[in-house]
Image (cartoon, helix red, strand yellow):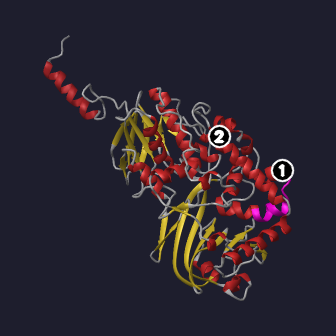
Amino acid sequence: MLIPPKKILCLLTLFSLLFPNSHSQSQPLPHSTICIVGSGIAGSSVAHFLRRYSTQSAADIRIFERNGIIGGRMATVTISGETFEAGASILHPKNYHASNFTKLLNLKRKTPSNDESSLSLGIWDGEKFLLKTFSVDSKIPFVQKAVSFANSLYMLLRYGFSLFKMNSFVEDTVNKFLKYYEGFETRPTFETVEEMLKWAGLCNLTTHNLQEELMNVGVSPLLIQELVTVITRINYGQSVFISGLAGAVSLAGSGGGLWAIEGGNWQMAGGLINGSDVELHLHEEINSISYLGGYYELNSTKGSSYMCKVAVIATPLDELNIQFTPPISIPERQLQHTHATFVRGLLSPAYFGLKAVSEIPQLVGTIEDPDIPFSSISILKKHNETDMTHKIFSRAALPDSLLDALFSVRKETIRINWGAYPHYKAPEVFAPFILDGQHLYYVNAFENAASTMETSAVAAENVARLILSRIFGEVSLSSPNFISSVSDEKILHSDL
């Protein structure tokens, strides 16, 4: 039976009203649109490497950020008109992606002054200082070097050759990690984190905790209980029972030659996004991702829908509420929350059983004890003898009553709660880089190995290569050598 033309028109009109997202021939599917969720170092690095490696210059890249600023966990805080790093704050001399980004974007490197690099250290057990290094209020280079030598000798007398064994363990791990900067001729793309770790010889470090790994190489229990614990509590807010690889990365972050970006590390993400011809959506959170056969539909909290050939998750999924259709399955993971409290004022020597502020170490680290309410206290800037800006790390929010006990003077206080990194435990279990067997990618799967700005960039580079090889069958540029592209000889030849 023939259907009258008017009825056909009515049926088509009704269909379009009921299914407004349906595509006709006049609305071609987004074959070259890549959607990235997250504007931190992972998301911005994916966009950068996609542009750098591909001849598909016409491809559209969209980045969605639920906050009003870019950078993710790279952020700054302003206290009394001065700006300090509030999130990811330090870079290692062998972080070659970050070094190359800094050079490419003409950003200025900030290295610690002699005053900062020779901060006095105290290890607090809740009642007393187990260790206090020497300090002197002098800007004379000879005096500073003499104090540094005295502190090195002091640490050697206390911990013995375990210090060298610890450093050797860290250096061996860093050297294995450097394989991720090799050229494409020897470096494949990886679909799983396990493959990526095994290729570099790092996978075994995720199967045992840091304490076990250090004891296996002969590091003394005293060094592990004191100095190593202080470092892991500061850098990852966790104990020495974190996995060995995360622990080694944490220890590497306490070495010499550390640096940051003048004005804030978030500028790396900003510069990479600006240089990658990206359509940026701020204040727009993605709440659902659906695979519709050949493309993805992303729906946002603004009620907007976006069609993408490729979808990239470049932010931790652990505390997000994105609905996936069809559902995805990834290992359950908890984020470790670090509370960063910034205080401008004056510490109270009475809290530490001391008589004068000058007796308080400039960096107070703590051992693993549930009764100690903070992980560390450090001086960010000394304005004068009675006015300083401090940064306190803790696993829980610090109440005003505790801050009033810690500080004799408190002019300004800012609190930030970061879902900063995974809660590490060995053996680690990893989500895949490809979540659905199609073109839904997860950069932050690598964070269960280690979470830093550089590891995010390394994972992002691998994901960008995966996308280009699986979608377009290409990675067009000649193979880069990331180490040789860093021109600063000090960076290239810095030791831990």
In-image side of 420 versus 496 (left or right): left
Name the residue carrying label 2.
179
Q: Residues within 10 Å of mark 1 (few under 14, many from 20)?
A: few
Q: Main secondary structure of the magenta part?
A: helix
Residue at figure coordinates x 63%, y 71% from the top left: 114
Identify which residue, 74 or 167, lies in the foreground: 167
In-image side of 215 versus 339 (left or right): right
Q: Position of residue 72 (x, y in %)?
A: 48, 55
Q: Position of residue 5 (x, y in %)?
A: 14, 19
Dot 2 amino acid type: Lys
Query: The N terminus is located in which quarter?
Result: top left
Q: Write down the quadrant of residue 251 in the picture.
A: bottom right
In-image side of 104 versus 406 (left or right): left
Residue at figure coordinates x 39%, y 58% from the top left: 68
Name the residue carrying label 1.
217
The segment highlighted magenta reads 216-227
